[in-house]
Amino acid sequence: MFPFVRLAKEMVKARRQLPLGLTDLHVTQHRVWPWDLDGFMELNNGRALTLYDLGRLGLGQRAGLIDVLRANRWGLTMAGSSVRYRRRLHAFQKFEVRSRAVCWDDKFTYLEQSMWKPDGECASHVLYRSAVTDKNGIVPPHKVLEAMNQDPTSPPIPGWIAAWIKAEAQRPWPPMQETDIPSLKSVA
């Protein structure tokens, strides 16, 4: 179940904090609760992605994006992600989520988020490709930023993000079906 109580708490906190630019760092504090755990008694990877949602929405609130989405009847969607899990987070452990937009192109905004343990160790890191949408499809990021009264010029795209964009462009869509995979045809 989506953590609506946590979401409400984060949105109220974000409204009370100073405004941010989209590329500024938004930091939130969290704790791993028993319902966040998997069978190995650590933060479930799916729940980690849900908790990352809370950080992005707080960033959107502080940057003025949420108000612009509502005013223009725009939606927000995730169009891709790449996650690295490196350290476990256990029951009742505190951690912080750091969220920021890194750059954008003609369709997507690229956001990075990370979870940090109190000892300064990074537990996980995610890169997201996000899009704002309307009834006609994707709203270009420059149009969104102009509506937010922010500079529509993207910071330079870091090499590691450019490499990910290039790799994603080579990934087949729609994915191959079992009947299209040579090794499975010979088994059948």
Image (cartoon, rainbow, N blue to C red):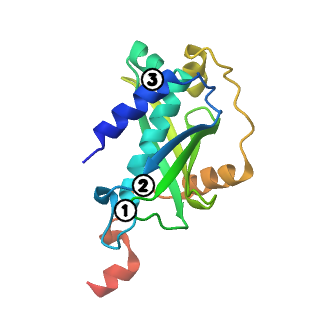
**Mark on residue 17?**
none
Q: Residue at x 33, y 57 (%)?
A: 36
Nearer the observer, 171 or 50: 50
Give amino acid for label 1: Asn
Q: Can residue 175 be seen at all in this image of the molecule? A: no
Of the numbered discs 3 and 2, the one sitting upstream in the chain is: 2
Q: Position of residue 168 (x, y in %)?
A: 55, 54
Q: Position of residue 17 (x, y in %)?
A: 54, 24
Q: Residue at x 53, y 43 (%)?
A: 129
For this orientation, the residue located farthest to the bottom is 187
Q: Which residue is mark 3?
A: 66
Q: Which residue is mark 1?
A: 44
Q: Residue at x 68, y 49 (%)?
A: 162
Q: Residues within 10 Å of mark 3 (few under 14, many from 20)?
A: some
Callout 1–callout 2 Cβ contact below 8 Å: yes
Give amino acid for label 3: Ile
Residue 54: which quarter of the image? top left
Q: Position of residue 98 (x, y in %)?
A: 57, 44
How far is mark 1 from mark 2, CA to CA? Answer: 6 Å
Q: 164 above or below 180?
A: above
Give amino acid for label 2: Ala
**Mark on residue 48?**
2
How far is mark 3 from mark 1, CA to CA? Answer: 28 Å
Nearer the observer, 103 or 1: 1
Q: Position of residue 155 (x, y in %)?
A: 73, 34
Q: Can residue 21 be seen at all in this image of the molecule? A: yes
Q: Residues within 10 Å of mark 2 (few under 14, many from 20)?
A: some
Of the numbered discs 3 and 1, the one sitting upstream in the chain is: 1
Q: Residue at x 55, y 33 (%)?
A: 107
